[in-house]
Image (cartoon, helix red, strand yellow):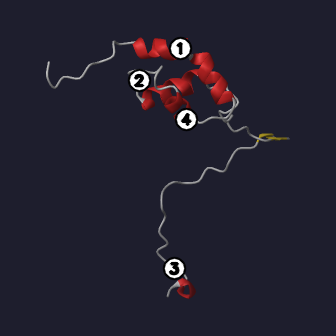
Amino acid sequence: MNGETRRTPWGKGRVIFLANMERFKDAAAKGWPFAHIYRENQDILEGISYSQFYHWARRYLSSCSRMPDKPKFAQTESGPMRAEVRSKRFVHNNNPDPKDLI
């Protein structure tokens, strides 16, 4: 038993999160960041890491006003305006303008 870590039973953390979800939802609606909500409730969230708390907060609290909405496209006469798609590949100019060279 020496050197072994105690593990939280599988699923217990999610049950704890869901049981206190209204408390977290109220804090998120007031604009508190998830890191602050986690720190303030660490005594309740026994055995839950911040990364797991953040995962559940994004999943279950996404309807809170603190969460940004997905960007909406502007409507034009020809349909929705979309951002211009640019190539992510660098294209080298083999024939540079001599004025641009140092």
**Dot 3 alpha-carbon crowd within 10 angstroms: few under 14, some 14 to 19, many 20 or more:** few
Residue lying at the far right of the rendered structure: 77
Label 2 vs label 1: CA separation? Answer: 12 Å
Mark seen at residue 96: 3
Which corner quadrant holds the N terminus? Answer: top left
In space, the residues marked 2 and 3 are separated at their CA atoms by 57 Å
- Residue 89 position within the rendered picture, expressed as x and y whole percent measured from the top left: 48, 57
Residue 85 drawn above or below residue 100: above
Question: Residue at horizontal 49%, vertical 64%?
Answer: 91
Q: Which residue does the numbered mark 4 point to in the structure image?
A: 36
Examine the rendered structure and indicate whether residue 52 appears above or below residue 15: below
Q: Earlier in the sequence, mark 1 or mark 4?
A: 1
Mark 2 = which residue?
Answer: 48
Q: Residue 69's image quarter?
A: top right
Give the residue drawn at x 41%, y 12%: 12
Counting labels gives 4
Looking at the image, tell me whether mark 2 or mark 1 is earlier in sequence order. Answer: 1
Q: Earlier in the sequence, mark 4 or mark 2?
A: 4
Image coords of residue 87 (percent x, y): 54, 54
Which of 28/83 is in front? 28
Tell me what residue is drawn at x 52 percent, y 35 percent.
Answer: 35
Callout 4: SS: helix
Residue under pointer 1: 18
Q: CA distance from mark 1 to mark 4?
A: 18 Å
Residue 85, percent from left and from top: 61, 50
Mark 1 and mark 3: Cα distance apart in space: 61 Å
Q: Secondary structure at mark 2?
A: loop
Q: Amino acid at mark 4?
A: His
Give the distance between the C-alpha atoms of the residues marked 4 and 2, in whole angstroms: 15 Å
